[in-house]
Image (cartoon, grey):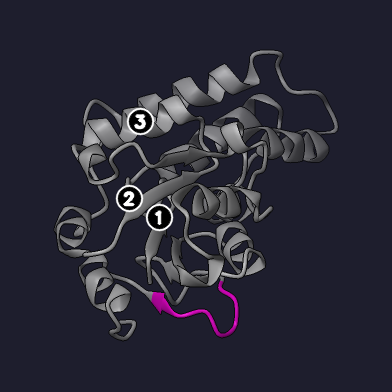
Amino acid sequence: MDLLILDLDGVLVDTQDAEDGALAYLGTLMGVHLEHHEAQELFSGKKVQECIDLLEGLAHRPPPPDAVPIVRAKCRELIGSTLEPVPGVREALARVDVPMCVASNSPLELIKERLSDCGIIDHFDGRLYSAYEAGAWKPDPGLFRWAARDQGVPADRCLVVEDSLVGVDAALAAGMKVLQFNVVPVRAPHRAGVPTFSSMHALPGLVHGGRSS
């Protein structure tokens, strides 16, 4: 592979549960009460506005006009004062020997903030791609195609690491190889034929020709 493309939330930084929880909190304000697993299945990997639209459909009422700021603020509250990378990420990034970039549905400033807070932004040398800049949100493949094109790498020479089905589907639609990461692989929805792994310590071996674990 000539380019490793990494998702942000749930792959590099441990924020997916907080984001799902923040959206579930908005749901309670709208009269929709979701269990943790329901919020995870409904929201993970999706654009915030898409999630709010889903809640509107479930609640049969419009969201608060400041719904996005409510979700962002609640997410920061749930994350707390210290944001950590997913266990094993620092060691994995130090051992991967191909160019890497981040491609996320999150806004660019949020990508920069979270990578900086975790102390891993230097691994990417400015190679950060936001769906808000591309105008294409996963599962649309446009974000991944833009990242590959900008880095001058053909799609079939790119390897994507995703934790959500929408990200996996975007990578497959872009014609890229994809690995699905999830710390609880037996409970994670996945696509047939897509290799999965459950420890970031395994990533360098997978990138350089190893097997999933």
Badge 3 marks a residue whose secondary structure is helix
Q: Earlier in the sequence, mark 1 or mark 2?
A: 1
Q: Where, quadrant-wise, is the C terminus in this rendering?
A: bottom left
Badge 1 marks a residue whose secondary structure is strand
Q: Earlier in the sequence, mark 3 or mark 2?
A: 2
Asked whether the beta carbons under mark 1 and mark 2 sit within 8 Å of each other, the answer is yes
- Residue flagged by tag 3: what amino acid is it? Lys
Q: Where, quadrant-wise, is the N terminus in this rendering?
A: bottom left
In the rendered image, which residue does mark 1 sit on?
6
Residue 26 screen position, x and y as percent: 60, 28
Q: CA distance from mark 3 to mark 2?
A: 12 Å
- Residue flagged by tag 1: what amino acid is it? Leu
In the rendered image, which residue does mark 2 sit on?
12
Q: Is residue 178 visible?
A: no
Q: Is residue 168 left or right of residue 84?
A: right
166 versus 125 height, above or below? below
Residue at the image point whose x is 63% and y is 63% from the top: 174
Viewer-proximal residue among 191 and 153: 153
Q: Quadrant of residue 32?
A: top right
Residue at the image point whose x is 46% and y is 70% from the top: 157
In the rendered image, which residue does mark 3 sit on?
112
Magenta residue check for 134: no
Q: Dot 3, crowdedness within 10 Å: few (<14), some or many (≥20)?
A: some
Q: Identify the disc placed on residue 30.
A: none
Q: Earlier in the sequence, mark 3 or mark 1?
A: 1
30 versus 149 height, above or below? above
117 versus 161 height, above or below? above
Q: Which residues are magenta?
A: 190-196
Q: Dot 1, crowdedness within 10 Å: few (<14), some or many (≥20)?
A: many
